[in-house]
Amino acid sequence: MNIGIDRIDFYTPNQYVDLVDLAKRRDVDPDKFTIGIGQEKMGLPLISQDAVTMAAMAADKILDEATKKDIELLIIGTESGVDESKAASLFVRDLIGLPKTVRAFEIKEACYGATAGIQMAYNFVAQNPEKSALVISSDIARYGLNTPGEVTQGAGAVAMLIKAEPKILALQNDSVFMSENVGDFWRPTFSKYAFARGKFSNEVYIRFFDELYDAYFEKNNTTIDDLSAILFHIPYSKMGKKALQSVENKVDEAKYHELMQRYESSILLSKSIGNLYTGSLYLGLISYLENAEDLKTDDQIMLFSYGSGSMGEIFTGKLQPGYKENLNQEQHLKELAERRKLSVDEYETEFKKEIEIVDGDWFIGNLTNEKYYLEQIKENERIYKSL
Ligand code: HMG
């Protein structure tokens, strides 16, 4: 039995910051951001949007009433949780109308959370082939104004339906993984923003990829020639490229050129949206499937998942015959084209907005006209609404 990704889609907020504008304001050569970092735009949520609303927006795109009935597992991978205790999944279950008989919880390990969710979902479907699992990654990447990480911010969610005989990608149950206690990037409970040892984080990311790349071929009876592409967690588009460059001497020239070309197809969405943290790898998968040329059924794609702190995993999936009909490229291009460009002043104002709770209450209303939103905080409890 094949198990894997049957449906996949993403959501990103309807406003963005142009990184050339940002570079000019920060007195930086725009080429540093667009070429050196490899990013063009970054999505920015309004104060009524958070990990819950973005997750619900993404999930809505892949679910219909019949699909919902078979879901028994809902996992949200996030490092932008809205509550230290209650899982985002419980709010989302309610908003999108999943049955009560769903096991719903949240997973955290930096950008690795959704991958942990997918592996758990895989095992769940293996035990329950008639049932399916919904895995959603949802995050807001924030380093703060005027920080080195500022240009690598972003926001959004990716929703994936994991089931038997999937239409898009059959996972191969061939993972290799590793973990270490590393101080490359973290966000303590007292801080709204992440701290990063930027250059060190790049080194750890590449080292994890290198070690896992070798471990993958040692464990599995395959060679790089059996793979059609390597997709990476994309904190910014130059990062995956650097990791791929690190294995250049392990791959023949033609294959390396092909992998690099295919990598370029996988970063198009991220360049325009930014870091989605736990969703970035899967946004890269959507970008790859929608933009790469000459894809064929049974192409085997390697995925490198990395979460700072640090946890890494490499696994592969095989492309399924129905993948193309289950993508939504036109809609994505339309949504991205319709986003509102914020001036740097508007971005900074929006960025600094704080939830101001007075006596346990705060009212926001619907700022976005989108289907799911945080309407208010009442008696210290978040109240979400759907249109
Ligand atoms: P920085 O210090 O501002 O940048 O921070 P830099 O000086 O290293 O320059 C970046 C690149 O731009 C360099 O290229 C420069 O040469 C080039 P490279 O040597 O790297 O190839 N450059 C130029 N290029 C063209 N024209 C110019 C020009 N000037 C310079 N004029 C850094 C960069 C990424 C460190 C920073 O943005 C940062 O700290 N970001 C956040 C941390 C991060 O994303 N780390 C990635 C690995 S960790 C990870 O992926 C996990 C994560 O997603 C979190 C999680 O797991 O939850 C972050």
Image (spheres, grey):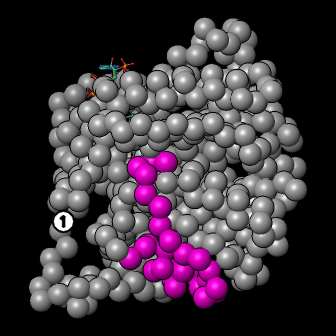
> Hey, what amino acid is under mark 1?
Lys
Q: Left or right: where does residue 366 sit relative to residue 228?
A: left
In magenta stretch: residue 90: yes
Q: Is mark 1 within 8 Å of ligand 1?
A: no
Task: Looking at the picture, tell me which residue is in the foreground, 339 or 232.
Answer: 232
- Label 1 crowding class (10 Å Cα cut-off): few <14, some 14-19, many 20+? few
Magenta region: 86-112
Whole-percent x, y for residue 2 in the image: 84, 54
Up/down of 87 relative to 112, above or below: below
**Ligand 1 visible in quadrant:** top left
Secondary structure of the residue carrying numbered label 1: loop
Please say whether residue 47 is visible from this viewpoint.
Answer: yes
* Quarter of the figure that contains the N terminus: bottom right
> Quick check: 307 left or right of 74?
left
- Answer yes or no: is residue 295 visible: no
Which residue position holds label 1?
353
Residue 242: x and y in percent read 48, 22
Residue sitting at 48 percent across and 86 percent down?
387
